[in-house]
Amino acid sequence: MANDLLITNCSLLSEPGGVIGHRSFVEIGAGRITAIGPMSSSPEPAKDTVIDAAGKLLLPGLVNAHNHCAMTLFRGLADDLELATWLKEHIFPAEAAHVNPEMVYWCTLLAAAEMIRSGTTTVADGYFFSGQAARALHDAGMRAVVAHGIVDFPAPSVPDPSKNVTTVAAFLDQWLGRSPRITPAVFAHAPYTCSPQTLRRAKELADQQGARFFIHLAETQAEQALIIDPQGSTPVRHLAELGILDENCVCVHAVWLDDYDLDLLADSGAAVVACPHSNLKLAAGIARIPDLLGRGISVGIGTDGCASNNSLDMFREMDLLAKIMKLRPLDATALPASAVLRCGTTEGARVIGLAEVGTVAVGAPADLIMLDQRSPHLTPFYSGDLLVYAAAGSDVTTTIIDGTVVMHDRQILSIDLAKVYRQVAPLSEGVRRFAAHRPKPAVPVR
Ligand SMILES: CSC[C@H]1O[C@@H](n2cnc3c(O)ncnc32)[C@H](O)[C@@H]1O
Ligand SMILES: [Zn+2]
């Protein structure tokens, strides 16, 4: 049988923390990995489908388990602010003025370009006008879980909040089964922007349709006070009491958890996405990732939107997560690099409901990246730990998704980037004018 693509002479890291196989081949057919082995047993290739990967390390594409892709338009718009000010005084007003279908399409494509260039092959997006986000990620050749946002106030795509859940139901109907790479899902923004009734309805919809349910949860200490609950419940207890916390529920952030919350999460089978850069930049806090993993809770890693990060480079995210977890316990073993690499690949994929993704194995989807090992900062290369502590998105030379080469020699093949820049330029001019004419919120002088 002719192979669609043959990668030869690569160094191969198939498992995080595993050994690196030198001079290996990977054969791909119909979007999946069909064979892996040493070069001595490499099949005869069809001539035009060979990538000679000598000097390259091949590993699974990274999984960004939480992003708001279209927020590329708002990168750098509101820095050095804590979450509530950032969101209410800057981001929500900017979104009300500038989020529209065209903006979501082009700014999501811009995010896709940044992700492909930094080795992310799968993303979980959560935003508005999600049909446009799904179209952009599909056009970019990415694999994605695209979750439509729900809030109980007029949102850019749903001016009448009483239609928030039905709008998402229509989005699910449109996208379920439409593209093999795009999986639609539901994103209830947070317990402080969605009433208990909305949360229940959104979760019911997700469960009925077999779609993943995402929610920002326990992000800041202040969130607890925002949830109207006479019992003084925590955000996690709030979801548990509503019957929402289960194996279909993905809690994004989950920073402020007490031990009982950890037990509830573990018993429920719910999953967590850690967003360390966003949590530090918005002064939200430091999540308890080793405690979550210790209780068997699945943890993925997300950049969050790049207005709160401000990068979509998952290598940077993994590096920070591994290091920041060592800080509070003053324990260098608190979260080893190999565990972080798992969270950025296989575990992240499992968290967002794509269990087959994130591994280099025969039969798995062919979502692969290659890094140039002939770089001073990656020499010598003793173990995969270097991917967490030394590698950067800019080391990625080739990105393959679903068996298709979407970037080679750092040239993106699936996106007309010049066109994206042309389309985004007037949108960003609008944001620049908007920011210039808004009264500046007072910044405390120290
Ligand atoms: C329905 S999700 C889209 C919605 O979420 C906002 N958002 C982005 N990052 C965060 C965050 O860290 N916490 C809470 N809300 C966030 C985004 O601006 C959209 O309005
Ligand atoms: Zn978010």
Image: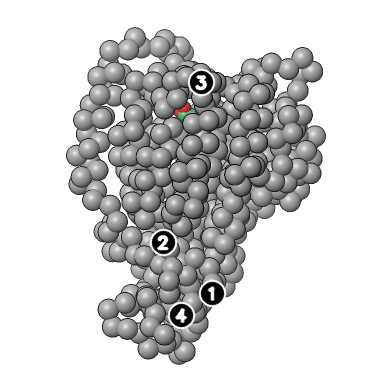
Indicate which disc, 2 or 1, sits on the residue closer to the N terminus: 1
Using the rendered image of the protein, determine whether residue 390 is visible from the camera's viewpoint. no
**Nearest-to-viewer mark from 3 and 1:** 3
Tell me the CA gap for discs 4 and 1.
14 Å
Indicate which disc, 2 or 3, sits on the residue closer to the N terminus: 3
**Nearest-to-viewer mark from 4 and 2:** 2
Indicate which disc, 4 or 2, sits on the residue closer to the N terminus: 4
Tell me the CA gap for discs 2 and 3.
37 Å
Other-residue count near label 2 (Cα within 10 Å), few / some / many at <14 / 14–19 / ≥20: many
Tell me the CA gap for discs 2 and 1.
15 Å
Give the amino acid at mark 1: Val
- Image coords of residue 352 (percent x, y): 57, 49
Where 294 sits versus 19, above or below? Answer: above
User: What residue is drawn where x is 32% and y is 60%?
Assistant: 407
**Which residue was labeled with disc 2?**
401
Tell me the CA gap for discs 3 and 1.
46 Å
**Which residue was labeled with disc 3?**
161
**Which residue was labeled with disc 1?**
362
The circle on residue 338 is none
Tell me the CA gap for discs 4 and 2.
19 Å
The circle on residue 24 is 4
Where 85 sits versus 130, above or below? Answer: above
Q: Is mark 3 on a helix, strand or loop?
A: helix
Give the amino acid at mark 4: Ser
Where 428 sits versus 122, above or below? Answer: above
